Amino acid sequence: MPRVRNPLLRTLVDLRGNGRACVYTEPMWGLSMALVLPYASVFMLALGVHDEQIGLLATISILSQMVFGLLSGVITDKLGRRLTTALFDIVAWAIPCLIWAFAQNFWWFLVASVVNGAWQVTQNSWDCLLVEDVERSEIPKVYSLVKVAAEFSALFAPIAAVLVSRLGLEPAVRILYLNAFVIMAIKIWLLYKLSTETDTGRIRREQTRGVSIWSSLRGYRPVLGLILRSKGTLFSLAVQAIVSAVSLVNGTFWQVVINQHLGVPDPLLPFFPMVRSLLSVLFFFTLIPALTHGKHLKLPTLLGFAVYLAGQVLLVLIPASDGGAVASTYGLLAVCLVLDAFGAGILFMLAESLVALHVDRHERSRVMAIQRTVVMLATAPFGWISGWLSGMDRTWPFILTSALLVLGVAVTARFWVTTHEPAAAPTT
């Protein structure tokens, strides 16, 4: 059998065990949540939820995630990576999908946002399940594959577009949420069946057997010291916080600004994330591997921030037309999609990889729990702030994201810390 030359494809073919289970089931996200996410904010507007309330819901969701994120390391160690992922995927995704499907007003969305915050527990456990048995040098490629799998989900966007055009926005979105409930349930079962507990997970489960959650939480104090003493961990935390804040604003208001400000009609909304995702996949198999090959990741990080910044600035500058979107509007949005696909794609991979590369491998779950909590604490205000800005002018949230990306460039240029191979264990 001929050897696959593309490094990303080679990693995909060579994956075994939990890495394969996590990556190979990830495209099911595309048949579930990815179908409905382009309509989430517009659906809320259709049910009478205001811009400020949408922003508030984003902040409440982050605060819920912060609480669950703080507990995630303890839960992941106590239950194991595999069981935690299964249980909390049900809580965080299956149950909220049913609430969203039958939502009537702001309060339904509020309850769903609080419950959905539990996804931070499964994000921690899933990350551990994904990388703990993978070679260190393969971690950036594995996260690239995760991103590619998620982006391929956009191929199913026309399904949502057809439903909305034929049934109307509200009934179509309710059907899509019910579909997400079913598909996510199947995904959860498949991942549990195809995965096994990691070696580190088995060790941590035995170490925490009989130890209460509160006693385990007190054990965070020395772990916090590990973080504060590591310049690399602090730097990766700062990068991840900036990328998360920008992602929060874009995920909440990008569809709103092109729909309500630029006049893009409802049935066309899912095609924009579809095109962005396909472009991102193209970049992940061509330009991004060439740029991130090897250990020198500073320049790719700076480039990612700069390109993403260009896309956000261009979105703000696109003129609105009273009669709806015109040809020039779509042309400029196409340029935005190219810039966003590259910038957001490479930054997602690098932000996650930098955390994984700098983290203490023996305390991975607890260190990542604290990191996620700090990142969410820093990110939380941007939901409410962007909603407040959108209520005044729907382009203003993207002035905010542009400022954050400028900060990302400055932080990377000034505080970059090179990743190193872990020191060998001392011999006796």
Image (spheres, grey):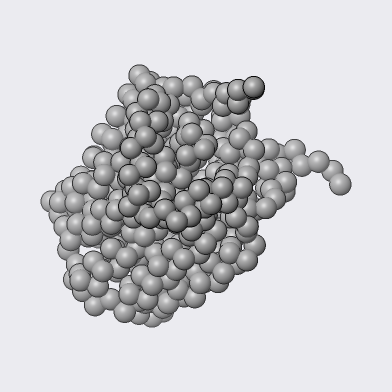
Q: Residue at x 28, y 76 (%)?
A: 103
Report whether residue 20 is seen.
yes
Q: Residue at x 29, y 53 (%)?
A: 67
The percent coordinates of residue 23 (x first, y second) are 60, 53
Is residue 415 toward the left or the right of residue 364 in the image?
left
The quarter holding residue 324 reads bottom left
Viewer-closest of 346 and 133: 133
Q: Residue at x 63, y 53 (%)?
A: 18
Viewer-closest of 416 and 172: 416
Report whether residue 321 is seen.
no
The percent coordinates of residue 373 (x first, y second) are 32, 45
Q: Residue at x 62, y 59 (%)?
A: 195
The percent coordinates of residue 10 (x first, y second) are 71, 42
Viewer-closest of 407 and 187: 187
Is residue 187 toward the left or the right of residue 239 in the image?
right
Quadrant of the snapshot with the C terminus: top right
Is residue 134 toward the left or the right of residue 96 in the image?
right
